[in-house]
Image (cartoon, rainbow, N blue to C red):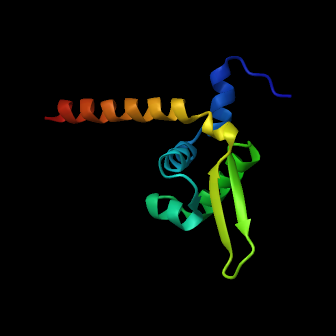
């Protein structure tokens, strides 16, 4: 078992990086989504990176992957109950981000 010096290390191990938080915010805001829907909302991410990040979030128990047995194949991603526990933290982070955007835009004027 890995040991951490402070709790935020454990959190960042699960949600750290540029894309995981963005994926989580989309799933929190829009609910269950197909891979193509996520990709449309995140035009700067490659398909390979999106798949990798989703797999890591799934392995950590934050995201669930549902595969429907149909043609063409249909796969959806949504938050697990454990992943939904991140909702308050993600909402606070988004709120802070909005304030930061406003602050930096005001400083540029």
Residue 43 appears anywhere in the view:
no
| Quadrant in the picture for the C terminus | top left
Furthest-bottom residue in this view: 71
Q: Residue at x 67, y 34 (%)?
A: 13
Q: Residue at x 45, y 29 (%)?
A: 92
Where does the image place residue 65, in percent across and percent down from the top left? 70, 57
Q: Is residue 104 above or below residue 71?
A: above
20 lies left or right of 105: right
Q: Residue at x 63, y 57 (%)?
A: 77
Q: Is residue 73 above or below residue 2?
A: below
Classify residue 87 by image quadrant.
top right
| Quadrant in the picture for the N terminus | top right
Where does the image place residue 3, in percent across and percent down from the top left? 79, 22
Where does the image place residue 70, in percent across and percent down from the top left? 71, 78
Classify residue 44 by image quadrant.
bottom left
Classify residue 34 by image quadrant.
bottom right
Q: Nearer the viewer, residue 97 or 44?
A: 97
Furthest-right residue in this view: 1
Furthest-top residue in this view: 5
Q: How many marks?
A: 0
Q: Residue at x 19, y 30 (%)?
A: 107
Residue 22 appears anywhere in the view:
yes
Where does the image place residue 103, in percent across and percent down from the top left? 25, 29
Q: Is residue 28 above or below residue 33?
A: above
């Amino acid at each position: 078992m890995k040991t951490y010096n402070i709790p935020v290390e454990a959190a960042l191990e699960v949600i750290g990086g540029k894309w995981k938080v963005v994926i989580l915010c989309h799933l929190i805001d829009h609910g269950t989504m197909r891979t193509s829907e996520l990709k449309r909302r995140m035009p700067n991410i490659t398909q390979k990176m999106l798949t990798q990040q989703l797999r890591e979030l799934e392995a950590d128990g934050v995201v669930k992957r549902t595969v429907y047995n149909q043609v063409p194949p249909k796969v959806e991603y949504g938050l697990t109950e454990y992943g939904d526990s991140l909702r308050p933290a993600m909402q606070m982070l988004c709120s802070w981000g909005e304030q930061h955007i406003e602050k930096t835009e005001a400083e540029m004027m």
